Image: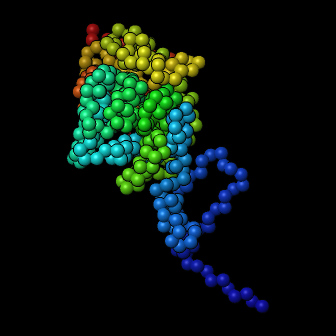
Amino acid sequence: MNRPARRQRGENTRSAHLPAPAGPPGSPLGLPVWRSSAWSRTGPPGGPETTGEDAADRVDNPTTAAFAAAVASLEGAAAPEDVAGQAFASGTAAVNAVLMTFLRSGAHVVAPVQVHDRTHSLITNVLSRFGVSADFVDYADLGRVGAAVRRSTKIIYAETLSTPSAAVADVRGLYRIARSAGALLVVDSTFATPVVCRPLEHGADLVVHSATTYLGGHDDCTGGVVVGRPDLIARLRRVRVDTGAELSPDDAFLLRRGLETLPLRVRRMCSTAMVFAAAVAKHPAVRRVDYPGLPGHPGHRLARHLFDSGPEGTRYGACVTVTPHGGHDAGVRLAGALRLVSPASSAGGTRTKAVCTASLGRRSGEDAGGDAGAVRFSIGLEDAEDLIVDVTRALDSLLASGR
Ligand SMILES: Cc1ncc(COP(=O)(O)O)c(C=O)c1O
């Protein structure tokens, strides 16, 4: 007896309904990338899985959620309370979500004068149009921070380590001011990473990262993340969803993979930065080196107090700002004379990069307490001796051209 021929679906249908892979036995050690922007919903029609917010969907991709949870575990290892996280499409999107969640028209924020350019721009160019006001003050003097606080202050915003002068935030002192003002203490810890300092242990309510830099660590993806108490993080999720600031699962995979080597990379970068800063400070063409590991830096004592240490000593971060004699022109020539170090403004990747801080934007130049000739080095994973040879040769060329 002939079996009736099975009806063949059309080629378009067959393409659109490719077989789904069965999961392999065992648990994968690598993080699966859930590269799907739509999910079929299970459960009875009308039930929570089919209609509710809790259903897995593109806004709560499991690969992306795994990255956020991983950062929460690193930042919250010894935090006094449970820590959750939300991931965002960029560091700027993460900062934006924090500000939009906890500020409203009429609210006021206090931020450091050296705050990252884009955060400054977000507050002054965007949020100001929605009735948010801000004061940017010198955080080296906590008295000024306290004096800037108003009844309407809802956020005290800080950066654990900021550029260009590598200012160190007194997170504990800021915590006391924030508590007495009834404001949240939000700390951008991009340049510290949880390997150097975990602000939640010192009283911060929320910690923000541009994951694009050290957490990813390879200059190949963009992302942001915020971690803190689960009730605060749940409120952030609402704004993330409402503003469409989702991190893609591919970038989340790369960022989460970067976390696996974060301590190895950051510890080595910090050690190299220390040796680099000490060597460069001795060069006669150099007017000033800003690095908190140097005993003369204004944030040195605070950093020793707040920052982690290991067998290699205290970790002071991996950005060193070098200001040659001769102002802006000398800074441009120094950056241009480097051969091994790449001219790039980003930080945190495997390659060492240098940028004239005046070119980073208005806030990174003299307006933000920087120097017109300052060059920021984001130290990478090269051998310290090779970096010192490169910068010494470039500094020698400044001296030679000045003769
Ligand atoms: C301290 C700090 N905050 C925020 C940002 C913005 O992050 P993104 O470039 O991922 O938007 C950066 C970027 O480098 C940064 O260095």
In the rendered view, does 260 fall on the left or right side of 366? right
Q: Seen from this angle, which residue lies furthest right?
A: 1
Is residue 374 at least partly visible in the picture? no
In the rendered view, does 252 fall on the left or right side of 185? right
Quadrant of the image occupied by residue 169: top left
* 310 is higher (above) or lower (below) than 69: above
Query: Residue at point 40% right, 9% down?
Result: 282
**Nearest the camera: 153 or 95?**
153
Q: Position of residue 279 (x, y in %)?
A: 44, 12
In the rendered view, does 169 fall on the left or right side of 9? left
Color scheme of the displayed model: rainbow
Query: Residue at point 26% right, 15% down?
Result: 326
Label total for image = 0
Q: Position of residue 212 (x, y in %)?
A: 44, 39
Quadrant of the snapshot with the C terminus: top left
* 126 is higher (above) or lower (below) than 11: above
**Nearest the camera: 392 or 148?**
148
Query: Residue at point 38% right, 24% down?
Result: 173
**Nearest the camera: 168 or 9?**
168
Q: Position of residue 254 (x, y in %)?
A: 52, 44
Quadrant of the snapshot with the N terminus: bottom right
Query: Residue at point 39% right, 18% down?
Result: 299
In the rendered view, does 203 fall on the left or right side of 313? left
* 386 is higher (above) or lower (below) than 46: above
Q: Position of residue 247 (x, y in %)?
A: 45, 49
Is residue 35 at least partly visible in the picture? yes
Q: Seen from this angle, which residue lies furthest bottom?
A: 1
